[in-house]
Image (cartoon, rainbow, N blue to C red):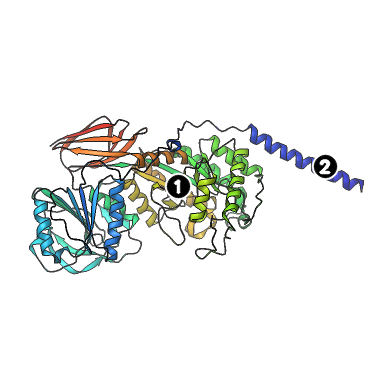
Amino acid sequence: MKKLRWAMQLLFLVLASMGLFFIGRAQSYQPPPSPVKHLVDSELLKDRRSLQQGAVEGLVLYYSKRPSSVEAQLELEQLLKDFRKSNRTVDLSHEFLPDDLQGYRTIYYLGEDLLQQEGLQASLKSWVEAGGHLYIGMPQASEEASSFQNWLGVESGMKENQVVSSISLEKDLMLGGAGPFAIAHPFDSAWGVQLDASCRVPAWDTETELPLLWQKEAGEGQLVVMNLGIYDKVYRGIYSLGLSLMDSVYLYPVIDAGVVYLDDFPAPISESEKIRISKQRQEPFDQFVSRTWWPAMQALGKELQLVYTGALVASYNKQVHPPFSLILPDLETLELGQMLVEQGGELAYHGYNHQPLQVQAWEQVMPEAYVSWPQERAIRDSLRSLEQLVTTYYGGQKPSVYVPPSNILSPEGRSVLASTLPDLRGIASTYFPGEGAYAQEFDLGSDGLLNLPRLVSGMDWDDFDRLAVFSELNTHFVHSQFIHPDDILDQTRSHGKNWDELLGAYRSSMQALQQAVPDLDFVEASRFANKVGGFLSLTLQVDEGRDFLDVTLGHVEGTRSFLLRQNKGRNLRVTGGRIKQVAKQLYLLETDAEKVRVEWDS
């Protein structure tokens, strides 16, 4: 009995010593001071993209009774909003074309029947030749020759649409290469046409050379035909190109930042992950993370000047009922998180556990993997415990971004996040819709939280990922991605590759990305939120002359960035900002001034 009592006392002393060690280590650890001034801390943060000054310049024509026209309208108006191009929208299913078109600079026609509407053709033709800009956003599919078809630059057309399998582009025209970019689910989307020599064709089908985008002059005006016939977020870079081809100089604001999230890091090793990686690599996964994966990610970050944001998980339990006790990280997890912060990275919230913030019963994706929370109070209590863990063990870190597990987040969960975590500034889910996914735009929620979507995941990008990266470089000049330490354990995410192959694939992709956009600054999540907040807050007014643009900016916080495409003239020069050529006819403009003048020789 005495031996048992002595053993119990010894065990108590050991556990108490370990507790004091962890607390002392956490209290003594102080992260490096952050130089970032949080723009998003200000109550003045507003989404001002729609608050444009001056006359309405664009007219969007679409048909609400036609699903394809609605898809095109939604995508186009999102871009026009981001680019600060004011417009009026007319639903031709219920309204008439305005009698007077002279006050509009650009008309965007998003119907598939323009070749059958002779009265509308005549109005648009005379308006363009007097100096207007016409963007035709849908393929027309007609084999009947007409004078209007010839006016569009079409020598001959087919009655049926043609399949588009991949996209190739004019060399050096855009950021991130000229393709080919494969279409994930090809179908007969484009009008089969032969064009005359007056047309410029910057995008075509790689195999058939079918024109997917063309531009031509008509009288004093310009017209662009978008013949891709697919409207989806991943093709926004192609739509952006089409929009930018009609003006002498086309300018639009961009985010200008990159961010890399390490999902489930730092985090304990889950029971399902306590395995050896493969028959070929007899290394336990927990040792792999600390001895192989993290050192390799550190080295790659230093090589490519990447800054990581770790999405922290406290536990992999499925507890959803209070109380939620403060979880003590194991020593290895604690050290990994502290190393991340010491090296300039920061932490984001991923969860007290890996249960998505969903109150209602699961009816969608992976119901067997998750349990719903009983009420909002339980979510709130778990978040407070998670916040206490970060404050206690990671030197007072105050994460500003939440990353939803499996990109799942309910409205109730978002509401609790906004009301519980006072330092939270944004939510980083996914950019693209999917089953059960919480898809986002780069915008500001009504609750004051920024939406900071991530574009791609994993270390080995597929065709869709490569197109997404290319498209967003040219639309928002942005890159956002996430990587899991356990990508190697998942055959789908790893594409069957071993660790060395995965690391090589990721290094190659990131090297190519940085070679294409060496000016893109990779930052931690809090600074990325600042960049997005500044992008949304900015107002823009452009007054155009024959050989100049006068740009007036409002709500400028720090340096703001723009992409600028020059289609006419030469010797581009800027007063009030800095300009650098990043592709053929494409420039990156940076300024912290409220007045900028862009000039060129006609």
Q: At label 2, which amino acid type do we have?
A: Leu
Q: Which residue is mark 1?
A: 447
Mark 1 vs mark 2, CA separation in Å: 52 Å
* Place of residue 100 in the rendered image (x, y in percent of width and height, measured from the top left): 13, 53
SS class, disc 2: helix
Which residue shows up at 39% across the image and 42% down it? 532
Q: How far from the left and from the top, in percent, is residue 245?
A: 20, 48
Q: What percent of the width, then of the height, locates residue 254?
A: 33, 42
Q: Which residue is mark 2?
A: 10
The residue shown at (52%, 48%) is 417
Q: Judge from the rendering whether residue 32 lies leftward or rightward of residue 444; answer left or right.
A: right
- Image quadrant assignment for residue 90: bottom left
Whether residue 357 is visible, yes or no, is: yes
Query: Closer to the camera, 287 or 72?
Result: 72
Closest to the observer: 305 or 246?
A: 246
SS label for mark 1: loop
Which comes before the other along the chain, label 1 or label 2?
2
Q: 7 above or below 68?
A: above
Work out whether 432 lies above or below 530.
Answer: below
- Residue located at (30% from left, 62% from top): 165
